[in-house]
Image (spheres, rainbow, N blue to C red):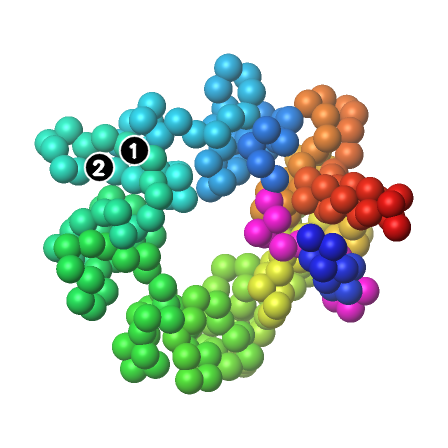
Amino acid sequence: MIKVFILNSVFVLIYGWTVDKANHCSCKNYSLFVDCVINFEYGCELKDFTCQNVNCTAQAPDRCSLFQNQCYLDKKNSNSKCQPFNSCSDLQGNDDRECYAQNIRCAKLGETGPNCVEFKCSYYSVDTCPLMCFVVGEKCTDFPDCSTLQLNRCNVQRVCYNDEMTCKWEECSNYKSDSDCMYVYTPERRIQPCYWNEKDQICANAEGPEDLSNFSCSLNTRGAYHWSSSKLDSGSCQSCFEMLLKVVLAIILIFV
């Protein structure tokens, strides 16, 4: 964990303040109702006025796919039911469509018997690389290199944009309204949070969590930061993961 903390500090020094999406908060950390609702991809749902881990079996079939990392749609019987999801290999299907219908992370690739597998761009060659993946060098990958993308494939939301001449990495300054000013991805696959500068009426790189409001804190960091209070008129934007690392580091330093 200390290595991760040091690595994060190096990133700040070299690239400015960026965020690793993998270091997202747990559901219990989201104090604001809106933070809980927008972070459904991490299995959070609002219940009894608190943010809780999703209960898959309580979800209606049409809501099951919202929680793709936690739930799958059991279609064995005529009445489809939402069930807890462990891995694609636990599911069975005759083709891509049947696997995908149970969980959108799953596919049917190669000779896997009756079982589904987790869809990965790396399974494909450069020649068979599907449209939802990108050819980077000699590999099929899930993340593009904007500098090498053809213009007709360049418009990758919050990653690449087409300036009508070349394909470039997205920048906060490309967004012209407060509602669109959220975040962009860096070439290192990290999140660059953006913030709306009211004075200049521009979207700019956030230099730290202090630039984010109670509304933008979690939204603009893809859930890696949270508002520390359940009240809109108090609190601050904080990282769950980095706070834990700082506590561990402080404990270690005490005993060194």
Q: Is residue 115 left or right of residue 239?
A: left
Number of residues whose C-alpha sits closer than 10 Å to that of mark 2, classed few (under 14), some (14–19) or many (20 or more): many
Count of numbered badges drawn on the protein: 2
Q: Position of residue 64 (x, y in %)?
A: 32, 35
Report if residue 18 lies within the magenta region.
Answer: yes
Does residue 102 sit above or below 107 in this rendering?
above
54 in magenta: no
User: Quick check: 202 above or below 59?
Assistant: below
User: Above or below — where is 149 with respect to 203?
Assistant: below
User: Which is nearer the N-term, disc 2 or disc 1?
Assistant: 2
Q: Determine whether the residue tagged by mark 1 lies in a helix, strand or loop.
A: strand
> Which residue is at 61% across, 68% downward?
188
Q: Which residue is mark 2?
A: 74
Please, what is the three-letter code of the amino acid marked with disc 1?
Gln
Location of residue 6 in the rendering, given as x and y in whole percent from the top left corner: 76, 60
From the top left corner, tell me how far across and down residue 138 is, in percent: 42, 84
Do the CB atoms of the residues marked 2 and 1 lie less than 8 Å apart? yes
Q: Which residues are magenta?
A: 12-24
Q: Which mark is residue 163?
A: none
Q: Is 15 placed above or below 255 here? A: below
The residue beneath circle 1 is 83
Residue 224 image-quadrant placement: top right
Circle 2 SS class: strand
Residue 221 left/right relative to 146: right
Question: How far is disc 2 from disc 1 in space, using C-alphas?
Answer: 6 Å
What's the residue at 59%, 52% (across, down)? Answer: 21
The residue shown at (14%, 37%) is 76
- Asked whether residue 255 is in view, the answer is yes
How packed mark 1 is, by other alpha carbons closer than 10 Å (few <14, some 14-19, many 20 or more), is some
Task: Give the amino acid type for the residue marked by disc 2 in the picture.
Answer: Asp
